[in-house]
Amino acid sequence: MPRPARTGRSRPADAGRPTGLRGPGRITVVVRGRLAEGGAERGANPVELAVVMPAILVLLFASIQLGVWFVARSTALNAAQTGVNAQRTLQAPAGTGRVRATNYLRAAGDWLVDWPPPTCTTTATEVTCTVTGRSLSVIPGVQFRVRQTAHGTVERWTTG
C-alpha cells in the first residue's frame, strides 16, 4: 500500500522558513522561552503559596468569627430590647420582660450560647434588661463574651 503524500501541515519546518504565529515551531519557542525566563525561580510558586496560605486561612476564619460575634451582639441587644418593651408597658406583671427576652433568645438560634436567664430590673420610672452569653465559636478554643443592655422608661399616668 503506498504512503499518502505529505502535505504542508505534516512536513517538518524548513530551517529558512519563518516561525510566526501559525508556524509549527511556535510552541517550542514559547516553552523554551518560559523555561529560560524562570531560571533559578522555577518552582517558587508552590513554596510561596505554602508560606502565604496559613495567613490567608487565619484571616478568613478571623473575619467569619468577627461576623458571628457581631450577629451574637445583635441577637443579645434585640433580646434585651424585647424584654424592655414587654416590661415597660402600663401595669406589666413582674418578670414579663425576662420571660419575653428568654423566649426571644430561644427562637433566635445558637448565635448566642451559654446564656443565663436575662436580668430585668424595674424602678418607678425605668426598666433595664441585660443579656449576657458567648458568641458561637468558629475557631476552636476562641470565645467572645457578649453583654448587651437596653433601657426604657416605664409607662405610667402622670399629671400634666
Image (cartoon, grey):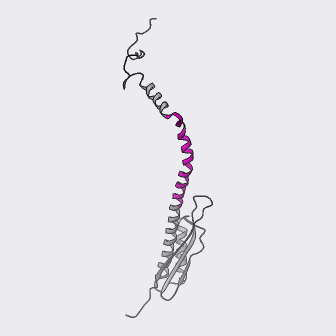
Of residues 155 and 135, the one nearer the viewer is 135
Picture coordinates of residue 57, whole percent (x, y): 55, 52
Vertical position of residue 97 compared to residue 107: above or below: below
Of residues 23 and 128, the one nearer the viewer is 23
Picture coordinates of residue 92, whole percent (x, y): 50, 84
Q: In the figure, is residue 86 to the left or right of 117?
A: left
* Secondary structure predominantly adopted by residues drawn in magenta: helix
Q: How many marks?
A: 0
Picture coordinates of residue 123, whole percent (x, y): 52, 87
User: Furthest residue to the bottom?
Assistant: 159
Q: Is residue 47 magenta?
A: yes
Q: Which residue is pictured at 54% across the width and 37% down the height?
A: 43
Q: Which residue is pictured at 54% across the width and 64% down the height?
A: 111
Vertical position of residue 160 compared to residue 43: above or below: below
Q: Is residue 52 magenta?
A: yes
User: Furthest residue to the front?
Assistant: 40
Q: Which residue is pictured at 55% across the width and 48% down the height?
A: 53
User: Furthest residue to the right?
Assistant: 141
Q: Which residue is pictured at 38% across the width and 22% down the height?
A: 19
Instruction: Report which quarter residue 136 is drawn in.
Output: bottom right
> Which stretch is magenta?
38-65
Q: Quadrant of the C terminus?
A: bottom left
Picture coordinates of residue 107, whole percent (x, y): 53, 67
